[in-house]
Image: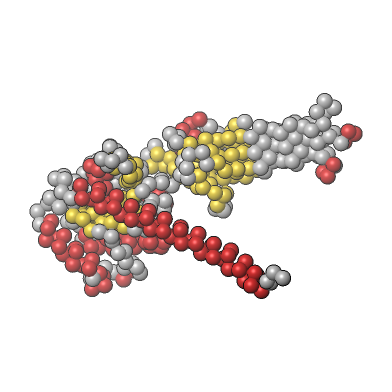
Amino acid sequence: MVHGSRVLLRKYGNFIDNLRVMVKGGAGGMGLPRLGGEGGKGGDVYMVAKHNITMKNVKEKYTHKRFVGDVGANSSVRSLKGSSGPDCHVNVPVGITITTDDGHKIGDLDKEGDQLRVARGGQGGGFRTNFHPSKGQKRIIRLDMKLIADVGLVGFPNAGKSSLLSKVSHAKPQIADYPFTTLKPELGKIMYSDFKQISVADLPGLIEGAHINRGMGHKFLKHVERTKQLLFVVDVGGFQLSFKTPFRTAFEMVQLLILELELYKEELLDKPALLAVNKMDLPGAEEKFQELMKQLENPQDYLHILPEELVPDRQIAFRQILPVSVVSGQGIEELTRCIRRSLDEQAELEIQEAAQEKLRNLHKIISPAMTDKIQSPSS
């Protein structure tokens, strides 16, 4: 059963990534005192992850955003045990984090078919409750979507992220020669000759101060959290957002991107990362690229060019730094090979770590058992 309530949403243009809704479990059914009958349980409310559904679909289908389980049946002479009220199932996109209105995490829906109970139905009336039923759980929850992708593109506006995505995948993001072309996340897939697919997310460009929600701010940064690896993209010639902001070299941009991730959530820097230095087709690009490589080999020697408050506490050891040009195609094929190789290496490492963890747990189980056997030998 679906009823009406107010909705709070955040969006990039028409792209909606957050909904605030009311959920309520159904009330239990009345018991029957004279015959000891028990009322039925009220219906629960579940969120269910489904592919090919967007937050916009949910908003448009359920205009008032109020989800309620049905009431349990009353006990009667014909049916002393009342039937349970039907549960309410709401289809939502894959990649949802569900929290209470005060920020407490209820759970994640990361793959097709995942479901999460967000409101419990009330118990039916019975002997222990003097045959009075209880009401269903009622609360406000938030549905927060974070894109799940193998690789997330990280860069300032006009670094060429959208152009790069369109070059390596079948995605067709909007591309133009001005800042903030990417107003909503775009997801593309790199297709390999052996039919392997790798998903790549192009996310709205960062600006200085994104960690405190300037520009796209947290609307961008939260989508980085669920990517397996990061691909930094910088303009070899540097970048200036506007005439009011300082010009930043490629090295400075790398440092500022690291800083924004660090200040938002430091553990993001633990993700494996690659660096693509774009626009190598421009005059003087090779000299600037070599200068950047020299700076990144010993970043501590060059951090003084940035104000102290803009220097990150940590550095990222990029797995590989590749010069590319989306315009000429230089380095694009090598980049796609490098992305796959890096993800394959990470997957292999995770398999080894999982096997080692299982072995450690097995030792914990076996060791006490062996000790007990030694201390208590059979007669």
Q: Nearer the viewer, residue 210 or 48?
A: 48
Quadrant in which residue 178 is drawn: top left
> Relative to 337, does residue 370 appear above or below in the rendering?
below
Quadrant (top left/top right/bottom left/bottom right) for the N terminus: top right
Picture residue at 26% right of the left edge, 72% below the top: 300
* Residue 96 in view: no
Q: Is 17 positioned to the left or the right of 119 in the image?
A: left
> Relative to 225, does residue 290 appear above or below in the rendering?
below
* Residue 104 in view: yes
What percent of the width, then of the height, locates residue 378?
69, 69
What percent of the width, then of the height, locates residue 336?
25, 48
What percent of the width, then of the height, locates residue 154?
31, 53
Residue furthest to the left: 283
Q: Nearer the viewer, residue 138 or 8?
A: 138
Q: Is 52 positioned to the left or the right of 232 in the image?
A: right
Picture residue at 43% right of the left edge, 47% below the top: 146
Picture residue at 87% right of the left edge, 36% below the top: 36
What percent of the width, then of the height, locates residue 359?
50, 62
The color scheme shown is: secondary structure
Residue furthest to the top: 78
Residue furthest to the right: 34
Q: Is 116 positioned to the left or the right of 130 in the image?
A: left
Q: Is 377 positioned to the left or the right of 289 in the image?
A: right
Quadrant in which residue 5 is drawn: top right
Quadrant in which residue 192 is drawn: top left
> Relative to 262, does residue 167 appear above or below in the rendering?
above
Quadrant (top left/top right/bottom left/bottom right) for the C terminus: bottom right
Picture residue at 67% right of the left edge, 36% below the top: 43
